[in-house]
Image (cartoon, grey):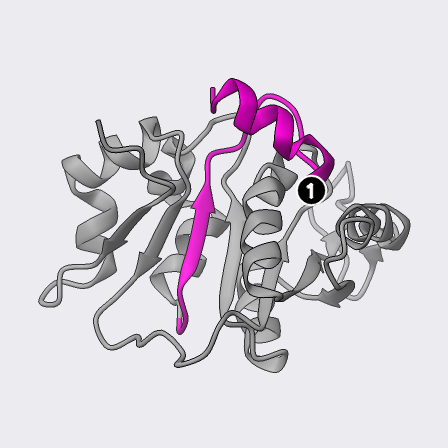
């Protein structure tokens, strides 16, 4: 029996990515596979070099770090730098009486730097260069923009934890990134607990859930 490390999927050239995401076969794979899924589309060519930089978007939840053990393996094999990124999405304060958000009054955003540095430290302890990055804006827009700015070879991200990969198909940040991607995107279904790189050996020993 073939033991694959990941599943690689591409879009249909004629109908584009939406056809893939909404197809019944693709939905089944995305929802039920315990393997990472490498997404690409026609016209995207792999760089003619080993991986140099991997952008890892997180959102402050434990589930969003489920991709970390896979990223650790890729970075160890290729020597790539890991860039842990979080988009700071402004939240407007809504007036409880009128139901409207006053213009120009965003709620103060918490600083995620400490948590991101802790995650980066897990990579560094295993000899993997890692740094953190934040930017204000909507999540999908900033993921794609920062991937271009740092010249990432790969975007590696988990899907929403609570609703699993069904949310990917139904319209999450991950779907938006994949639909507009200008480089390969590696997806992994969020697990019930976070997998920092230190958990990778345990995960490999017991198999993916």
Examine the rendering and report whether any part of residue 108 can be seen: no
> In terms of image quadrants, where is residue 98?
top right
Image side of residue 136 versus residue 155, left or right: right
Mark 1 lies on residue: 99
On-image quarter of the N terminus: top left
Near-viewer residue (117 or 168): 117
Examine the rendering and report whether any part of residue 102 can be seen: yes
> In terms of image quadrants, where is residue 45?
bottom left
Near-viewer residue (159 or 121): 121
Coordinates of residue 78 in the picture (x, y in percent): 55, 64
Q: Residue furthest left?
A: 14
Residue at point 48%, 22% (across, down) = 207
Disc 1: CA contacts within 10 A as few (<14), some (14-19) or many (>=20): few
Residue at point 61%, 66% (across, down) = 80
Image side of residue 100 versus residue 205, left or right: right
Q: Is residue 189 above or below residue 121?
A: above
Coordinates of residue 168 in the picture (x, y in percent): 40, 41
Coordinates of residue 92 in the picture (x, y in percent): 74, 52
Residue 184 magenta: yes
Please give the range of residues in magenta.
182-209
SS class, disc 1? loop
Q: Is residue 103 above or below residue 186?
A: below
Image side of residue 162 versus residue 91, left or right: left
Q: Is residue 203 above or below residue 122?
A: above
Q: Is residue 6 above or below residue 102?
A: above
Coordinates of residue 101 in the picture (x, y in percent): 72, 52
Residue at point 66%, 49% (across, down) = 58
How many dots with numbers? 1
Near-viewer residue (93 or 54): 54
């Amino acid at each position: 029996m073939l033991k694959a490390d990941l599943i690689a999927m591409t879009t249909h050239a004629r109908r584009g990515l939406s056809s893939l995401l909404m197809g019944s076969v693709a939905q089944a794979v995305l929802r039920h596979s315990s393997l990472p899924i490498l997404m690409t589309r026609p016209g995207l060519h792999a760089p003619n070099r080993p991986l140099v930089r991997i952008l890892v978007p997180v959102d402050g939840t434990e589930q969003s770090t489920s991709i970390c053990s896979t990223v650790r393996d890729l970075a160890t094999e290729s020597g790539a730098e890991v860039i842990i990124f979080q988009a700071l999405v402004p939240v407007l304060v809504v007036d409880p009486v009128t139901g409207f958000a006053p213009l120009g009054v965003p709620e103060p955003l918490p600083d995620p730097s400490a948590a991101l540095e802790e995650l980066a430290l897990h990579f560094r302890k295993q000899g993997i260069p890692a740094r953190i990055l934040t930017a204000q804006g909507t999540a999908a827009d900033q993921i794609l923009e920062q991937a271009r700015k740092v010249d990432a070879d790969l975007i590696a991200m988990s899907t929403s934890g609570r609703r699993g990969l069904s949310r990917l198909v139904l319209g999450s940040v991950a779907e938006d990134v994949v639909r507009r991607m200008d480089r390969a995107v590696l997806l992994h279904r969020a697990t019930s607990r976070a997998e920092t790189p230190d958990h990778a050996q345990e995960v490999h020993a017991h198999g993916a859930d």
